[in-house]
Amino acid sequence: MKKMNFRIAACLTLLAAAVASGCFGFGGFTLGIFSVPVPVSPYFQGAYEDMAFEQDRYNQVPVLPPIVDGIPEGLDAPSDDEVIRLLEKAKPDNGGVPFLETRYRNDVRVVKELVADYVDPPRFFPMVGAVQVHHVHWKCTVYFEQNVRVGWPIPYSMEKKDAQEVVYIDKDHLHAVDQDMNAVQQ
């Protein structure tokens, strides 16, 4: 009998502790239905990570110091990673359909050519101030060897040794305007 009373008392103590701590939503803070873990597909997780990576790395416009003499050289040429990401974004079906058609790129070589490099006259942008927009345009040609493997209805593969794609990239950035130049423009 004493053992049974001890078990009942222990269960009631644990139940009171669970209710008081908010495990069942009766007391304290609870997230409700959002406290249940939900599995996330690796596809969506990878897509979100790629979006955050591109936003941090490529989609922000920097404000650089004022231009001292003439037109400065543009920022660095686009990286190979940026060119390949834009190529895949421009042609989303370029990878094929898994198990039906798969495309591979081998021996990738990226050639970058500067097309245009010019600076606009100073103007005022809200939340930035007086700046000059520096436009830099690049033509990036991607040379690669393409392999296409088709798995249905009849499995076969094709090779194209001299495939190429062209991607145009505009890298615009801002230059702060010197105070003397700002007074001259007004």
Image (cartoon, rainbow, N blue to C red):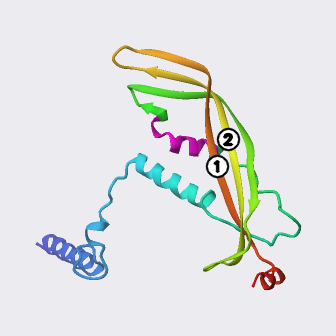
> On the picture, is 129 further left or further right than 104?
right
> On the picture, is 33 further left or further right than 4?
right
Above or below, 132 against 37 in this view is below
* Alpha carbon distance from label 2 to label 1: 7 Å
- Amino acid of disc 2: Cys
Return the residue nearer the eye: 167 or 85.
167
Does the magenta portion include 25? Answer: no
Would you name the residue on which mark 1 appears? Answer: 169
Q: Is residue 79 visible?
A: no
Which residue occupies the extreme right position in the image? 69
Q: Is residue 22 visible?
A: yes
Q: What element carries label 2?
A: strand
> Pointer 2: residues within 10 angstroms few (<14), some, or many (20+)?
many
The residue lying at 62 percent from left, 30 percent from top is: 164
Magenta segment boundaries in residue numbering = 83-93
Question: In the image, residue 58 lies at what x, y percent?
Answer: 62, 56
Q: How many marks?
A: 2
Above or below, 127 against 48 in this view is below
The residue lying at 23 percent from left, 73 percent from top is: 24
Q: What element carries label 1?
A: strand
Question: Which quadrant of the figure has residue 38?
Answer: bottom left
Above or below, 3 against 108 in this view is below
Quadrant for the N terminus, please: bottom left
Question: Which quadrant of the figure has residue 68?
Answer: bottom right
Instruction: Report the magenta stretch's main SS.
Output: helix
Q: Earlier in the sequence, mark 2 or mark 1?
A: 2
Would you name the residue on which mark 2 appears? Answer: 140
Label for residue 42? none
Question: Which quadrant of the figure has residue 159?
Answer: top right
Question: In the image, residue 85 lies at what x, y percent?
Answer: 57, 45
